[in-house]
Amino acid sequence: MAARDISLEKGLPSNIEAEKLVLGAILLDDSAFIVAASTLQAEDFLLEKHRRIYHVMVALNETGEKIDRITVANELMRRGQLESIDGISYLVSLDDGLPQIYNFESYIRIVKEKALMRRIILSSQKIIERCMLDQEDATTILGDAEESFLKLGDAGIRNSLLTPGQIIEEFEGGISTFLDPSRRVSGIGTGYFKLDEMTSGLHGGELIILAARPAMGKTALALNIAQNIACKDGNPKTVAVFSLEMSREQLLTRMVCAEARVDQQKFRLGYLNQEERRQLQMAALKLAEAPLFIDDTAGTNLMDIHAKLRRLKSEHGLGLVVIDYLQLMSGRGRSENRTQEVSAMSRGLKLLSKELKVPFLVLSQLSRATETRPTGDHIPQLSDLRESGSIEQDADMVWFIFRPEYYKPDREDLRGLAELIVAKQRNGPTGKVKMAFLRQFTRFENLADDIGIPEE
């Protein structure tokens, strides 16, 4: 039945165009599904064919498949439902010529609001029918009416508002563990003592942005943290590394040399002694046994990462995700400007980290502002995050790497010193952690006299 006929016959609130735009936007860029799925269910669509299309999108997402015209049509055909949604021509009409949608969330809210209004109408009709029959006490009908209306919004809020007693009851270990800091579960250790002390480790659902100017060592630090977690004696965690800049061979070379403490330049040139070769072999064997997974697909996008991580988590578990780096990710859709595209990706990564309950360490470039300040102060600031102010907003933590020797090469006392600046931390103090940077090994190390300097 046509959309116009349904709205005329039943008189139900609807916005068929908004439903089409939501489905079309997902077909155009399947990363939009993550945003839609957090709010919409198939039953929120008025048209039965829209419900079937959305059901198929949910099924494809659960299996890690991409969502586009072909995959949706193929799944509908497999289920014998393609003709029931007016064939592949209808799927084509949903996204054909559709521009990139920036108010996508507004259309989702419209669809959700119309669905809620329809449920209110149907609930009201049942109450009216009971009143017209006059077979029950008025107070009974009134009580049932109140309960039915409250339940309409229950699905969205029942897990959001909890009493202190419920929170403690759900806390792993109960009240004794909740009140004992030494027994409370902390985050995953990075291997850097002062950093772990300041942050209590990395926690599931956190988006951590690691930013620096080129040549400061942000890839090196991210790989060092990944190695420390994946190679931890007795309790290794699975780590996924998505490298959009370097090949997997280059990354593995870096990690092996860092683990073996062998000069990378000597390794490339082949000037190695017997001891260095032995160290490299031991390091390679250690990494070969570690639950460390590397993906170097160029121009990867959010839905690709989502599908791969879902599969990896189901098969091996997941402790940390590293993405190098944000500005090289693809938005897989037409975009008015790069700032909006980066904003959408940072928001999507935050939602994905919450869904998977895994910390995401995402590398980011800084603008040239650090180099051009007239005062000569090259220390990074939150305003230096490149291409998107929403990165700061979405992130739970923002770290900057600053190596003063880069700007003052004549200062012997600064040689090999680095600072990791915790510029933002949603659940803890900000401050600085001093580290040693071994350039020849591309490796950051703890200092014996590391000093955490929390700010007020």
Image (spheres, rainbow, N blue to C red):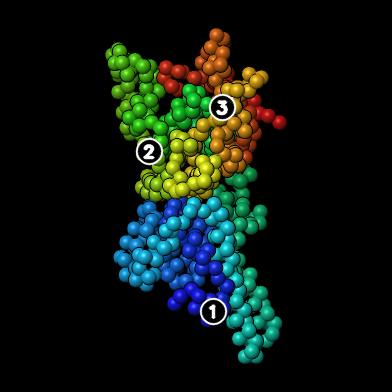
Q: Quadrant of residue 251?
A: top left
- Residue 426 drawn at (x, y percent): 62, 40
Judging by the rendered image, the residue that carries numbered circle 3 is: 368
User: The C terminus is located in which quarter?
Assistant: top right
Task: Look at the picture and state if 149 lies above or below 403.
Answer: below
- In space, the residues marked 1 and 2 are separated at their CA atoms by 50 Å
Q: Earlier in the sequence, mark 1 or mark 2?
A: 1
- The answer to whether residue 354 is visible is no
Neighbour tally class for label 3: few under 14, some 14-19, many 20 plus, Cα within 10 Å: some
Is residue 84 left or right of 393 when viewed as pictured? left
Image point (45%, 68%), residue name: 51
Query: What kind of element bears circle 1?
Result: helix
Task: Look at the picture and state if 354 lies above or below 152.
Answer: above
Image point (65%, 87%), residue name: 131
What's the amino acid at mark 3?
A: Arg
What's the amino acid at mark 1?
A: Leu
* Foreground pick, 85 / 229: 85
Judging by the rendered image, the residue that carries numbered circle 2 is: 298
Judging by the rendered image, the residue that carries numbered circle 1 is: 8
